[in-house]
Image (spheres, grey):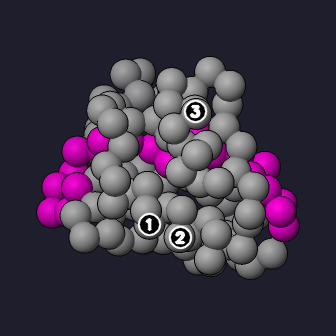
Amino acid sequence: MEQLQRYHPIFTENYQWEFLSNLNGKALQEFLKTDIPTSARYANQAMQQIMANKGLIWGVIPKQQTNLIGIIELQNITNKSLLLNLNFQQSVPQEILIRLRYFIKQQLNIQKVYFNPDAKNQQEWQDFFA
């Protein structure tokens, strides 16, 4: 499998996906609704997963802004499948879903995407990523 730390930043027409460690700490703290030490631990654990080639976690920000609108998390990445978590304040913008599907299917060459059973849009996303 390729080195996952290569995959940042990723751009769409209106958004930038960046590793949490490269984002504004206050923006991450506000998005997670937690304190500074907890936010720092979360970002540190995310980077450990990326550097160990076990997962990818990006914060999503609108271009030319610093406010975090969502987190994309790819976990348990194997040659065949992964677990996808999408944590957004509102619905996930379509251009992000389209770019993410392309990234998973074409760049990582992964055919099966799993979701947490408690994800609120699980069925919709499962159909989209099928």
**Residue 27 coordinates in the image, percent (x, y):** 29, 40
Question: On residue 122, which mark appears?
Answer: 3
What's the residue at 41%, 21% (across, down)? 34
What's the residue at 64%, 69% (across, down)? 105
Whether residue 122 is visible here, answered yes or no, is yes
**Residue 1 coordinates in the image, percent (x, y):** 80, 75
Of 113 and 44, nearer the camera is: 113
Q: Which residues are magenta?
A: 62-85
Residue 42 located left or right of residue 1:
left
Q: Which residue is mark 2?
A: 102
Q: Is residue 129 above or below residue 124?
A: below
Comparing marks 1 and 3, which lies closer to the viewer?
3
Does the magenta run of residues contain 84? Answer: yes
Gap in angstroms between the C-alphas marked 2 and 1: 5 Å
Q: Secondary structure at mark 3?
A: helix
What's the residue at 67%, 59% (across, down)? 50
Q: Secondary structure at mark 2?
A: helix
